[in-house]
Amino acid sequence: MHLSRLALFCSLSLSALTSHANSLDTLPEPGLWISESTTLINGIDMQARMREMRENMLKSLPPEQRAMAEEMLGSEGQVGERQCITADTAQTMADPEALLADARENMPNCDLKVEQVSGDALQFSGQCNDPDGFTGDLSGSVQIVSSREMRSTFNGNGSYALPAGLMGNSAEASDGAVKLEHSQVSRWTAQDCGNTPAL
C-alpha cells in the first residue's frame, strides 16, 4: 500500500468488509447511498485538513483557472461520498469468500481476520506489514443497522511515513508513528442513482 493510497486505506478495507457484512441477516437496499466519514491521523481531522489544503490551492490560482479547478473538484458544500448499489451488486456482496479475496487483493500486505458477533455485526482485526506503506495493527467493526443504514469503525496503530505538510504547520514532526481512527455512516438515499456510477 503506497503513500498515495493513505486516504483510501480505511475506505478500501471498510468497503471490502462492509460488503462482507452483507452476508449477514440484513442486505442493503439497492439504490443511491451516501457515506459520511471522519478520519483522524494522530488526532488531526484529515477531512478538515484536505478542505484547508483545497482552499489554499484554489486561492493561489487566477480567477479563470480557479473556476475550472472548482468545476473539476466539485462543490465544496457537497456532503458525503456517493455510491450506487445495484440489485446485482447487492447479491454479489452476499458472497463472503469473494469479498474477503477482494480485500486481500486490495491489501496484499495485510492479514485480516473477521468474526461475526451477531446476526448483523462483524468485528475484524489484523496486521499489515508493508515496507512502503502502513505497518502495524488494525481493528474495527461493521454493523448493518437496517437495510438503509450501515456503520463502521476502523482503528490502526503503527508506522507510516507521512508527507511533509500533510499534518499542517502546527503539527509536530512525525517520526512515522501513526494512530488512525476512522468512522463511517452510510445511508440509503434514493432508489434512482442518477449519474452516480454503479459499484
Image: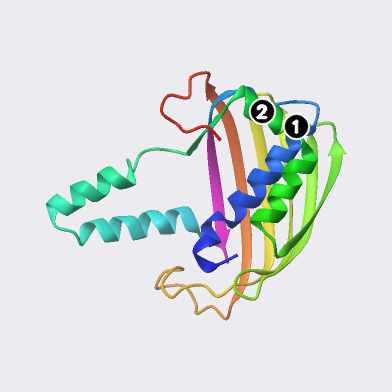
Residue occupying the point 45% across, 31% down: 196
Quadrant of the drawing holding the C terminus: top right
Where residue 156 appears, as percent x and y from the top left, is 68, 62
Question: Between 27 and 79, which is closer to the camera in this rendering?
Answer: 27
Q: CA distance from mark 2 to mark 1?
A: 7 Å
> Which residue in the structure is indicated by mark 2?
90
Q: Is residue 37 magenta?
A: yes
Mark linked to residue 71: none
Residue occupying the point 35% across, 60% down: 53
Instruction: For mark 1, give the secondary structure.
Output: loop
Quadrant in the picture for residue 41: bottom right
As drawn, 141 above or below 109? above
Residue occupying the point 41% across, 28% down: 195
Quadrant in the picture for residue 142: top right
> Which region of the structure is painted magenta?
34-43
Badge 1 density bin: few <14, some 14–19, many ≥20, Cα 10 Å: some
| Residue type, mark 2 in image | Ala
> Which residue in the structure is indicated by mark 1?
94
Where residue 107 appears, as percent x and y from the top left, is 67, 58
| Residue type, mark 1 in image | Ala
Q: Is residue 128 magenta?
A: no
Instruction: For mark 2, give the secondary structure.
Output: helix
